[in-house]
Amino acid sequence: MKRTIEEIEGKIASGKATVLTVREVEELISSGREREVREADIVTTGTMGIMSGTYALLSFPIAKAGEYRRFTKASINGVPTSVGPCPNESLGIIDLMVFGTMECEHRSDYGGSFLFRDLVEGKEVSVEATSNDGRTVEKTLTIGEIPTAKLLSTRNCFRNYRAFVNPSEAEFKSIFSCQPFPPRFGGLSFSGCGHLNPLQNDPQLRYVGVGSKMLFNGAEGFVFSTGTRCSPKYPNLMTVADMKSMDPRLMGGFITGAGPECLASYAYPIPILDDATLKLVMTKDEDIPLSVGDIRDRHKIGQADYGQVWNGRDEVITEDKAPCVHCQVCAAKGVCPTFAIKVDETGPVIDRSRCVNCGACVRACEEGCFKGFLGDVRVKIEGVERTIPIVCRSSNREGALRIMEDLKRRVLDGSFKMTKKVAEIEP
Ligand code: SF4
Ligand code: SF4
């Protein structure tokens, strides 16, 4: 089978293109309708999860021109920022870079990633800036008053990732789980949406390159490079998109055992030009390796696969108020990394716009108010076969599905025009 991008573009324009999500491909295969997959012109793929390399570039007026020479220090909602690179001398304009992983100076349950979502939700934020002569300016504003608000990435959308366990005798706090890792292989956390992931479906970066258009947190964005520590095994991307078009439900903050982390989501359309591409989009989770590392130094100690963490597991966590005994302090609420749980007189309620289905609440509430089968992973570590319970999922398939379905709709209605890359990027 051979197709060209131009043929696919023509089919989209005439309303005759077949666009499937990679989840629909999976469903067709499992119901024995593999032949229908061959009709697909485009398969949309997606991922959502913790992506540390996310940062914002904001530029806005903060004072009258000539009032200050330049600003040297600034924070927003208490989150420290880097001022510059442009000094904007005497213009009264400030340029700021804000890292998603930067913790607020006044509280440990807030950081850059939470600020990004607050901005995208249209909330007011408080800026405090100090000038080179020591004077301080305070200003409250919303994203509507920030002419430039871009989100960028240093290494996002990576092709799946890894799982971690803690072999030591003591708990270990890390960015790879919302709770400290229990000792003696007591729990496993993992990242990666498995076969749904964009780069899992284009591992050699045949289609993704400089100028490729993607959805980044629901906004149209572009790839401009491969990311830091990129390798053929773990390719990842530098991307950019306008925060003003983002969907807050597809981004935000996630509190880990070692500070705030940043949630991000991506969707990418794969054109099915030949059999090799078709074969890749038909890859199953069980055929995708998932290495298991020692969380203390991240070296590999075991090998699993994505089928072991996603097949037969509940992708969506739900609540059941009935068993709630109204504890004085709700343990589930205490572990929720996105502050998605509220408890009222009737029991717990999950805010679906914030929940990322990490599963921490399922294990935290001993009364069984949270439903979702996370399961165990069987893995051989240093010659010993171990069964380790999954205690935290750092990736959210429900969000990945939402963004890839949105992309499918936009491709079909013509509002998302596919772009050809303008330069290759090496994995
Ligand atoms: S949801 Fe569970 S942990 Fe929270 S108050 Fe109810 S019973 Fe207690
Ligand atoms: S699964 Fe539970 S703990 Fe995790 S984000 Fe959703 S409500 Fe919070």
Image: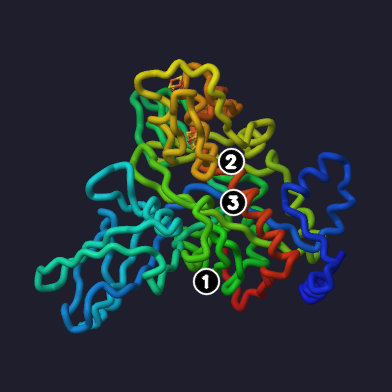
Q: Quadrant of the N terminus?
A: bottom right
Q: Which mark is residue 290?
A: 2
Q: Quadrant of the C terminus?
A: bottom right
Q: Which mark is residue 409?
A: none
Q: Which residue is mark 1?
A: 224
Q: Foreground: 380 or 117?
A: 117
Comes first in the chain, label 2 or label 3: 3
Number of numbered labels in the structure image: 3
Task: Classify mark 2: residues with Cα within 10 Å, few (<14), some (14-19) or many (20+).
Answer: many
Comes first in the chain, label 2 or label 1: 1
Label 3 secondary element: strand
Name the image quarter holding residue 192.
top right
Residue type indicated by callout 2 = Leu
Task: Classify mark 3: residues with Cα within 10 Å, few (<14), some (14-19) or many (20+).
Answer: many
Residue at x 54% of width, y 26% of height = 370
**Residue farthest along the front direction in this orientation:** 345
Residue type indicated by callout 3 = Thr
Q: Foreground: 212 or 317?
A: 317
Residue 167 left/right relative to 304: left
Q: Position of residue 165 (x, y in %)?
A: 46, 32
Q: Position of residue 84 (x, y in %)?
A: 28, 72
Q: Which mark is residue 47?
A: 3
Name the image quarter holding residue 8.
bottom right
Q: Position of residue 131 (x, y in %)?
A: 16, 71
